[in-house]
Image (cartoon, rainbow, N blue to C red):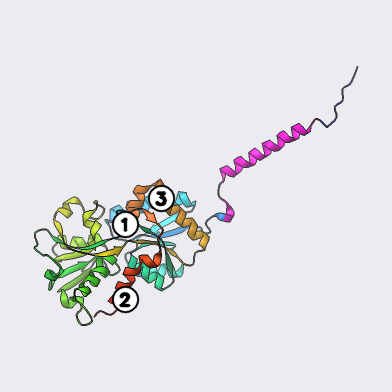
Amino acid sequence: MKHLYYSIEPFPLLQMLIAVLCLASASCSDNANPRDPDNSLSLESVVIALKANKNPQKMLAEKDALETYLSVKLERPVKVIIPTDSAVVVESFRNGTLDLGYLSSTDAARNLDQNSASVLLIHLKNGKPHYNSVWLSLKEKDYQSIEDLQGKPVAFASRSSTSGFLIPCWDLSQRGLIGTDISLDNFFSETIYGTGYASAAQKVLTGEVEAAAVSDYVYKGDDKYLSNEQKARLRIVQEQGPVPSHTLCVRSSLSSQDQSILKAALLQMNLDNPTLCDQAFNGELVEVNPTEHLRVTQEALALQSTLKP
């Protein structure tokens, strides 16, 4: 019987095949776990603050949707809070318990002054980085301008609102109606502060005040803040502006890598879920020059500091 013996030389082809299969297996493994440890978020969880300026029930729905979307996108637990006091946001940025905050340009400027947060993104309203402030009254009232409201009770959206307080005060000062020797309470019979746009407008609807200062989109936009029935009972007395749009601020103590990851996830929302982006942040999110965007707000804040309390 003849025995056939094979040398090992023909086997390089088999070795090459095994190598290819190993590479393919490694590639599949990488695709199954795309997170790169050297390029991932260092935070174990993310906390975001929204402004309490809408109908509470709608805000809770937006809170849940935003938590779900960003938790998947960032692969981290995300908690959305809705503080009613802007001072809480400032302190939370400072002590490291807040990572992102959706803030008026007034609150953003104050956080920048304290080096606790910086502007990451802003939202566009009707394709623009600004909008107007308005005074609303009941439809049957015949007020034609803010001058007609002298000696009347009015409401501001909140002390931290740009369109619902800062810019209206700036306009009153420009008109010479308030100043270093004339306070708001000297001009109006009473000034009341709400917890947001909806609460200020509600005070007009109930007759508690004669007019309220809010953003123009509260009245001109959809029913996020007021129902169509409520808007039908109101009208615009006067507009003033421009008002720099709201900002998404990020805690200054976060690393540049973490800030970049958060920014990328938020910008992706413009494409993945523009409806949620509009609901939570009032429009498309974009990058901007923070100094230029906040210029009007900072000028108005500087002027406000000279007015009579």
Q: What residue type is labelled 1?
A: Lys
Task: Please identify the quarter of the rendering in which residue 172 is found.
Answer: bottom left
- Answer few, some or many: residues within 10 Å of disc 2's Cα (few below 14, many 20 plus, some between 14 and 19): few
Horizontal arrangement in the rendering, residue 61 relative to residue 156 (left or right): right
Q: Residue furthest top?
A: 1
- Give coordinates of residue 247: x percent, y percent: 37, 61
- Give coordinates of residue 138: x percent, y percent: 13, 60
**Does residue 144 appear in the picture of this structure?**
yes
Horizontal arrangement in the rendering, residue 13 relative to residue 3 (left or right): left
Task: Please identify the quarter of the rendering in which residue 208 is found.
Answer: bottom left
The stretch in magenta equals 10-38
Image point (39%, 70%), residue name: 111
- Answer few, some or many: residues within 10 Å of disc 3's Cα (few below 14, many 20 plus, some between 14 and 19): many
Image point (26%, 53%), residue name: 224
Residue 32: within the magenta?
yes
Q: Name the residue under label 2.
A: 302
The tag earlier along the polypeptide, 2 or 1, is 1
- Magenta-colored segment: predominant secondary structure: helix
Pick the quarter of the image with the N terminus: top right
The residues bearing labels 2 and 1 have C-alpha atoms spaced at a distance of 25 Å
Q: Mark 1 points at which residue?
A: 128
Horizontal arrangement in the rendering, residue 271 relative to residue 53 (left or right): right
Q: Which amino acid does label 3 sit on?
A: Met
The residues bearing labels 2 and 3 have C-alpha atoms spaced at a distance of 35 Å
Q: Which residue lies furthest to the bottom in this view?
A: 181
- Give coordinates of residue 232: x percent, y percent: 15, 53
Image point (46%, 49%), residue name: 72
Q: Nearest to the eye among marks 2 and 1: give it.
A: 1
Residue 111: within the magenta?
no
Picture mark count? 3
The tag earlier along the polypeptide, 2 or 3, is 3
Q: Name the residue under label 3.
A: 269
